[in-house]
Image: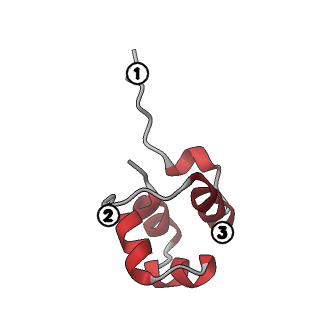
Amino acid sequence: MNCIKEVLEKQGRSQKWLAAQIDKSYNMVNAYVQNRQQPRLEVLNEIAITLDVDIKDLLVSNKKNI
């Protein structure tokens, strides 16, 4: 699972904008945003750089807080 949608909304950016920045189709970015498909680590890193966030900010932790 990823948090790309939340980061885009927080920054006021669109999926179309992200698709153009990382040279992916809108449909592919939409699949990432809707968590129907997960980006490869290289693509996730490119998204993090483009959005100027830590790559960890784009991921949902699999650890429960104790």
Q: x, y percentage for residue 2?
A: 42, 51
Q: x, y percentage for residue 55?
A: 61, 49
Q: Which is more N-terminal, label 1 or label 3?
A: 3
Name the kind of residue labelled 2 in the image: Gln
Q: Which is more N-terminal, label 2 or label 3?
A: 2
Quadrant where the image shows the C terminus: top left
Name the kind of residue labelled 3 in the image: Thr
Q: CA distance from mark 3 to mark 1?
A: 29 Å
**Circle 1 sits on which residue?**
65
The residue at the point 46 percent across, 60 percent down is 4
**Circle 2 sits on which residue?**
34
Between 56 and 24, the one lying in front of the other is 24
**Circle 3 sits on which residue?**
50
The residue at the point 47 percent across, 84 percent down is 16
57 versus 32 height, above or below: above
Q: CA distance from mark 3 to mark 2?
A: 19 Å
Q: Secondary structure at mark 3?
A: helix
The residue at the point 41 percent across, 31 percent down is 62
Q: Which is more N-terminal, label 1 or label 2?
A: 2
45 versus 21 height, above or below: above
* Residues at discs 3 and 1 in contact (Cβ within 8 Å): no
66 versus 12 height, above or below: above
Q: x, y percentage for residue 15?
A: 45, 78
Q: Secondary structure at mark 1?
A: loop
Name the kind of residue labelled 1 in the image: Asn
Q: x, y percentage for residue 9?
A: 43, 68
